Amino acid sequence: MTQVTQTDSAPGVLARIDSVIARAETVLIGALMLAIFGLLMLNVISRSIGSPVIWVDEAAVFLMIWVALTGASLALFARQHLAVTLLPDLLSESARHALARAVDVLLFGFFLLFAVILWMWFDPITLWQAGSVREFSRATFNFLYQEPTVTLGIRKIWFWLAMPVFCFCGLVHTGAHILGRGGVRT
């Protein structure tokens, strides 16, 4: 398991929020991985006795999506994403610092754009104004809140919420790096 530590300290409250989110992400990933393992073992056992549980595969896939996005966010916090270091290795310390800062700003911009797209897709204001999910879907032809999963029978929105959670956490992590010592990668 990766130890969650932050090499850059963002000022005050944002640094504490950043660390709390990272700890929560670590716990969530562990719990989800345990749940996925349990589901897959249930699948193996139920198939071996000739009575497969059909919803297990779909549940495992949706949980894996949550794990992947949460893990990507945690990797942003810990600065552990894969990187091509050919250019940074050739640069001076101050140029590496500037490049790292530029990458953090670009990532923050990406998450801001992602937030705008998610806001337009989830359209919470129109949903609130519509008064009901059914009326919202009828008026906008956006069935985001109504579409059920194939075998679970649960609305997919509960799994799609991984995207705004990832976006929020990514904004916090990259914002903390920007406000920290400048994003020097170690």
Image (cartoon, helix red, strand yellow):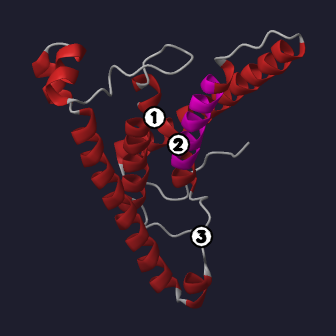
Residue 19 rendering spot, x and y as whole percentages: 50, 41
Q: Nearer the viewer, residue 111 or 140?
A: 140
- Is 180 situated left or right of 84 in this image? left
Q: Which residue is mark 1?
A: 162
Q: Residue at x 61, y 23 (%)?
A: 59
The residue type indicated by label 1 comes to: Ala
N-term-proximal mark, 3 vs 1:
3
Residue 61 at x, y = what percent? 62, 32
Residue at left 22%, top 29%? 141
Element assignment for label 3: loop
Observer-nearest of 179 and 155: 155
What's the distance in space between the residues labelled 3 and 1, CA to CA?
24 Å
Left or right of 179, for residue 36 = right
- Identify the residue under disc 2: 69
> Three-letter amino acid code at disc 2?
Leu
Q: Looking at the image, is 19 positioned above or below residue 28? A: below
Per the rendered image, the range of residues in magenta is: 58-73
Q: Give the CA distance from mark 1 to mark 2.
A: 7 Å
